[in-house]
Amino acid sequence: MFWTEDVAAKCVGPQIINDSKTPSGRVHVGAMRGVLIHDAIFRTLRERGIEARYLFGVDDYDPLDEIPAGKGAHFEQFLGQPLCNVPPPDGSSASDMAEHYISEFFQVFEELGVKVEKYRMRDIYRSGKFNEAIDIILRNAETVRRVYKEVSNSDRSENWFPFQTVCEKCGRIGTTEVFAYDGKEVSYRCRPDMVKWARGCGHEGKVSPFDGRGKLPWKLEWVAKWISFPVTIEGAGKDHSTKGGSRDVSAACLRAIFQKEPPLNVPYEFFLVGGAKMSSSKGIGASARDMANLLPPELLRFLMIRTKPNSPVNFDVHEEGIVKLFNEYDRFHDRTVTGKATADEAFVTRLAAPASIEGHEFNANFQLVTALIQMPHLDAVKEIEKRAGRPLTASERAHLEARIRSAQVWVDGYATEEEKTRLQETLPARAAELTQAQRAFLHALADALPDTTWEDDALQSKIFEVARLTPVEQSLAFKALYRVILDKAAGPKAGNLLAFLDRDFLQRRLRELPFDRVQFWKETSVTADELRAWHTKEAAKIASQEHRVNVEGAVFSTEYTFTLTDGKRVLRRVVTEGTPAPEGVLA
Ligand SMILES: [Zn+2]
């Protein structure tokens, strides 16, 4: 069972899922993990025919306790005020700071097809929806203090009440402390020294705690949400879900004050992004917006929900990491379309995929698309269409265009110089590092090209065959190819890449690097004993064999070509001085 199915199996009756975010700056993509975990649970419940709602709160009554990166001058004076009361940064058309940052986050929800019922804490408090819960919690302040002590071993003074008013004088909420409640009004003071990040004005007053004049601390705000909405499922990050952590405190308060059980928790681990910080100078990084620009919706959903919530996910935007993600998604997708997927693979693919899952007959491999868009002489869509032998359908075209957009964002914003795939107009200097065997392989491949069908699979097979007949290790053969064409050590599947290149250009390039025939023979030779040992071991697989002798000065290369039972051909070479290898070395 996929993990969302395990969660669904525990649910009886209608469900209300809740999640929330404090919009205190650009939202990091890590916050999408909770959003998409809840979304996956929501979709699974709906699919099971279980009535469900997915609520998402904007915690905009939280105080501004940190200045968003690079915005010091604007925000400093507002530290301590509720986020919904802080003006947006310059140039923003939003009504306030909370709106400014959360709207960018919600735009990502739209693109990912995450459908939530949004609410704002500002509206919840001001409309009086939490009045009853606030009154009960304040009357039970002593119970709250006891729970804090018992569950998290934190001391609160006898005069501490779980509430913060908006200071009537300075408008701050993060600096106020309530020390009495008479059932109608709370007494508070605005302390200059209460927190490090903001300075209260020293005002003391008495005010009603209802209708938006203040807020509950967030552990009690959780309790009020759970009891008022009421919430049945709410996952929390691992940092909140530890023993004695905030989740435990909230649950214990709920039980002690309201005699109710807390919602089902789905604790989830961190989502970390590696490699993105290098691009901060370009203003591109790891915000939810940035990642939604980089990855198509189905890839971002797949990345976030494929792994069980209690395992961390570390996504690396370097070439290796992003290529692996796309390839893994494609593999799951293809296996699902062809009916070869396991139940879990098919389930997560359907959860991640757009509305319907369709097969794609053409190759939109991310690494290939990335290489194509970096070749100035090619139009990637036209080239891929040419290879498919027909125009792409509308959905295929949309799929390909999404890949092209991702590839372009990655190349422009994240790829290092070394990771960029530039078709080399001239032979790269680093090709000089190739061995004689690698060079000889390139020449042999050039010789074989005129008879090779100019198509991905045929070219790929030819590369393997020429490598076996050189002979050179396959990995070294591919490295030689990537080096002389792209000046890289790796690249997209070579057969795919070559199919997009001009045959004459390729032949010229492969022959450009000279090699020393005798050196090449020596690098690739085996001794007569090694040959006999190999021959004995592989005897059952050998269908036929032939040999010939080449000579260069006094050096003889006796070359045995074996045709194996699977049709493949391999070559072994024995090099001798003065005379060829003795007749009957394999008799
Ligand atoms: Zn004040």
Image (spheres, rainbow, N blue to C red):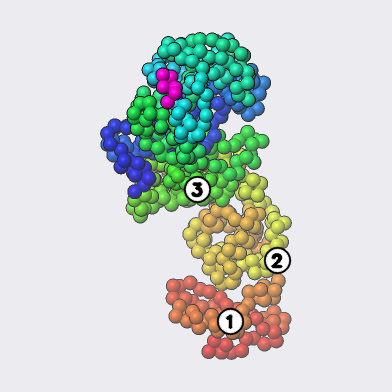
Residue pictured at 45% horizontal, 73% vertical: 567
Left of 23 or right of it: where is 362? left
> Residue 402 at what x, y percent from top left?
48, 39
> Residue 186 at what x, y percent from top left?
48, 13
Tell me which secondary structure the magenta stretch mostly adopts: helix
Q: Does residue 75 appear in this view? A: no
Q: How many marks?
A: 3
Residue pictured at 51% horizontal, 50% vertical: 324
Q: Secondary structure at mark 1?
A: helix
Give the quadrant of ligand 1.
top right
Residue pictured at 64% horizontal, 36% vertical: 280
Q: Which region of the structure is painted magenta?
A: 138-143
> Residue 467 at what x, y percent from top left?
57, 68
What amino acid is found at the position of numbered circle 2 in the picture? Answer: Pro
Left of 431 or right of it: where is 41? left
| Circle on res. 325 | 3
- Closer to the chain start, of discs 1 and 2, is 2
